[in-house]
Image (cartoon, helix red, strand yellow):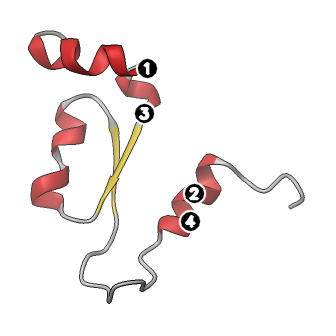
């Protein structure tokens, strides 16, 4: 990625391709992909505290070593 967006992301740490953006609103959260981030959009509409799938995303990122 080039241009002004890259300049805003680069100082934050990992490269955009090494970053995962997780959201639940495709129209609003799709910007992560435009910035070069891996993006995962979870189902929206769940009740507060309801299961949306973030637990599965976290297991992919940091699997339990005991399993």
| Image depth: mark 2 or mark 1 in front | 1
The tag earlier along the polypeptide, 4 or 3, is 3
**Image quarter hosting the N terminus:** top left
Q: Kindly indicate the quadrant of the structure image that contains residue 50.
A: bottom left
Question: How many numbered marks does the figure carry?
Answer: 4
The residue under the point 43% across, 20% down is: 13
| Image depth: mark 1 or mark 4 in front | 1
- Residue bearing the label numbered 2: 58
Mark 4 neighbour density, 10 Å: few (under 14) some (14–19) many (20 or more): few
Distance Cα–Cα, label 4 vs label 2: 5 Å
Task: Answer above or below: position of 37 versus 44.
Answer: above
Residue at the extreme bottom of the image, as rendered: 47
Find out whether the residues at labels 4 and 2 contact each other: C-beta distance under 8 Å: yes
The tag earlier along the polypeptide, 1 or 3, is 1
Distance Cα–Cα, label 1 vs label 4: 24 Å
User: Measured from the top left, where is residue 6 in percent x and y?
Assistant: 21, 15
**Image quarter hosting the C terminus:** bottom right
24 lies left or right of 56: left
The label shown at residue 13 is 1
Dot 3: element: loop
Q: Kindly indicate the quadrant of the structure image that contains residue 46.
A: bottom left
Find out whether the residues at labels 2 and 1 contact each other: C-beta distance under 8 Å: no
Dot 4: element: helix
């Amino acid at each position: 990625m080039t241009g002004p967006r890259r300049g805003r992301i680069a100082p934050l740490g990992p490269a955009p391709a090494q970053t995962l953006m997780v959201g639940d609103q495709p129209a609003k959260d799709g910007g992560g992909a435009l910035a070069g981030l891996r993006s995962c959009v979870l189902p929206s509409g769940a009740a507060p505290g309801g299961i949306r799938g973030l637990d599965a995303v976290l297991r992919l990122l940091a699997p339990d070593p005991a399993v």
